[in-house]
């Protein structure tokens, strides 16, 4: 029995992309076939827009992108922001205060661009172990001499704040401190990172908001994910699909489970259960 959907949102890391951060030809072909059936297919990621692979975003059938965990939804054809829910400057300052208590690599996202401090990047191996993830970050971030100075220079609301930590203990301690700050959403997708958005922000809510604009009901939206920052998306949309390589909480919350990202699970699920 086929599942009737009008929108499909896909997390990138650990979901649509392989472990090597590759978008396979088979996956692109299946997404094209879905789009030809009138389904809106789109990335739904914690990355800033500037971190979405050009290979994906330039595909003619990709029109929208949910970025920064739902903090910003963009029409990628014209660059127009269709929906945003930002972290206020005053709140972001408090988040950075907490991150600065630890040996951390701090990032701030403005208008789809991720900024990182130069000296932290020189020691990036302390904060990230995966070579493909390191390569991705180095290729997509704008480096600044001082991330706090950049933040104070901008002095405005932002898409997301991220911290990458040397140890799990530091990450957990920082999370505890962050709980004292009102008006934020705390999540993460890596072993030692924390991602902070405005309260109420998640990829699922962003997809539902976009669906309202496009005349697509919540029940007609399918989402694929694997990590903690996908959990609320999986729970929010009409049909949630977990990757077999995902965390247990996501698999428990999902309606279905697909093969792993390295088995092209998203594409194989769509071909079997969605395509006519």
Image (cartoon, helix red, strand yellow):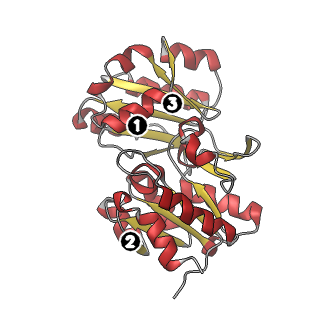
**Local crowd size for mark 2, using a 10 Å CA cut-off: few (<14), some (14–19), many (≥20):** many
The residue where tag 2 is placed is: 257
The secondary structure type at the circle numbered 2 is: strand
Residue 115 sits above or below residue 190 on the image: above
In the image, 239 versus 243, the foreground residue is 243
Mark 3 → mark 1, Cα distance in angstroms:
27 Å
**Local crowd size for mark 3, using a 10 Å CA cut-off: few (<14), some (14–19), many (≥20):** some
The residue where tag 1 is placed is: 178
The residue where tag 3 is placed is: 140
Q: Which mark is residue 155?
A: none
- The residue furthest bottom is 1
Left or right for 56, reference 13: right
**Residue at 46%, 30% in the rendered image:** 95
Residue 50 sits above or below residue 141 on the image: below
Left or right for 214, reference 8: right
Residue 46 sits above or below residue 247 on the image: above
The answer to whether residue 228 is visible is yes
Percent coordinates x, y for residue 262 in the rendering: 35, 57
């Amino acid at each position: 029995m086929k599942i009737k959907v009008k929108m499909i949102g896909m997390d990138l890391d650990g979901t649509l992309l392989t472990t090597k951060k590759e978008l396979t030809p088979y996956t692109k072909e299946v997404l094209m076939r879905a789009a030809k059936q009138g389904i809106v297919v789109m990335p739904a990621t914690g990355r800033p827009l500037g971190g979405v692979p050009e290979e994906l975003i330039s595909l003619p059938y990709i029109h929208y992108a949910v970025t920064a965990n739902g903090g910003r939804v963009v029409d990628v054809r014209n660059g127009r922001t269709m929906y945003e829910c930002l972290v206020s400057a005053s709140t972001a300052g408090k988040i950075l205060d907490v991150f600065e208590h630890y040996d951390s690599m701090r990032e701030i996202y403005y208008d789809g661009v991720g900024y990182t401090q130069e000296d932290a990047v020189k020691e990036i191996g302390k904060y990230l172990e995966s070579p493909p993830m390191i390569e991705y970050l180095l290729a997509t971030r704008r480096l600044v001499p001082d991330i706090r100075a950049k933040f104070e220079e901008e002095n405005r609301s932002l898409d997301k704040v991220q911290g990458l930590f040397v140890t799990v203990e530091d990450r957990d301690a920082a999370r505890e401190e962050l709980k004292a700050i009102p008006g934020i959403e705390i999540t993460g997708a890596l072993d030692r990172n924390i991602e902070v958005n405005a309260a109420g922000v998640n990829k699922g809510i962003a997809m539902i908001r976009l669906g309202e604009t496009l005349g697509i009901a919540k029940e007609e939206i399918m989402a694929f994910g694997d990590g903690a920052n996908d959990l609320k998306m999986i729970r929010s949309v009409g049909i949630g699909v977990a990757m077999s390589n995902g965390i247990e909480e996501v698999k428990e919350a999902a309606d279905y489970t697909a093969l792993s990202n390295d088995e092209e699970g998203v594409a194989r699920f769509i071909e079997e259960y969605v395509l006519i």
